[in-house]
Image: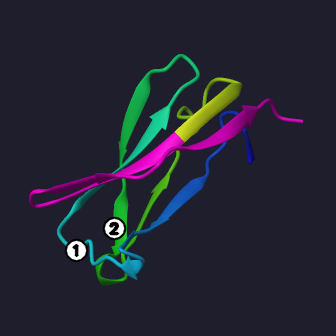
């Protein structure tokens, strides 16, 4: 997946646990963006439908500010449960 530098994008989460939709009502959901330098930036996500396990984060134009390979992962904290998804790589490119 390639995204254009300094544009906005919405990253969406559908949380599942043991292959079943996970009710994330009352949880804290964050999107972790790992820059090419290795720096991890934490962004607060919005829970759009907790019972359905849905959350999202829309980037600011300043979030994806370096052309290169990045990765993203979700972190969900619900009570004593703290779960992080596997990272997914993506490319940030200059505007064509």
Viewport quadrant of the C terminus? top right
Q: Which residues are magenta?
A: 72-96
Residue 7 position by quadrant: top right
Instruction: Indicate yes or no whether the magenta region holds residue 87.
Output: yes
Residue 58 place in picture, x, y as percent: 51, 53
For label 1, the residue is: 25
Mark 2–mark 1 contact, CB under 8 Å? yes
Instruction: Tell me: residue 13, above or below residue 36.
Output: below
Q: Position of residue 59 (x, y in %)?
A: 53, 46
Q: Which mark is residue 86?
A: none
Question: Where does label 2 land, which residue?
Answer: 47
Q: Residue furthest right?
A: 96
x and y, in percent, of residue 42 in the image: 36, 37
Mark 1: give few (<14), some (14-19) or many (20+) Cα within 10 Å. Answer: some
Decide if residue 60 is in sight here: no
Residue in the image at 70% along x and 33% along y:
5
Look at 53% across and 26% down and name the residue there: 35
Residue 55 lies, in percent from the top left, at: 40, 66
Q: Which sits earlier in the primary sequence, circle 2 or circle 1?
A: 1
Name, please, the residue furthest toward the front: 18
């Amino acid at each position: 997946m390639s995204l254009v530098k300094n544009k906005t994008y919405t990253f969406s989460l559908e949380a599942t646990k043991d292959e079943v939709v996970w009710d994330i009502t009352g949880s804290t959901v964050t999107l972790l963006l790992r820059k090419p330098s290795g720096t991890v930036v934490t962004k607060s996500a919005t829970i759009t439908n907790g019972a359905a396990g849905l959350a999202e984060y829309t980037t600011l134009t300043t979030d994806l500010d370096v052309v290169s390979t990045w990765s993203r992962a979700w972190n969900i904290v619900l009570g004593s449960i703290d779960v992080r998804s596997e990272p997914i790589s993506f490319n940030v490119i200059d505007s064509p």
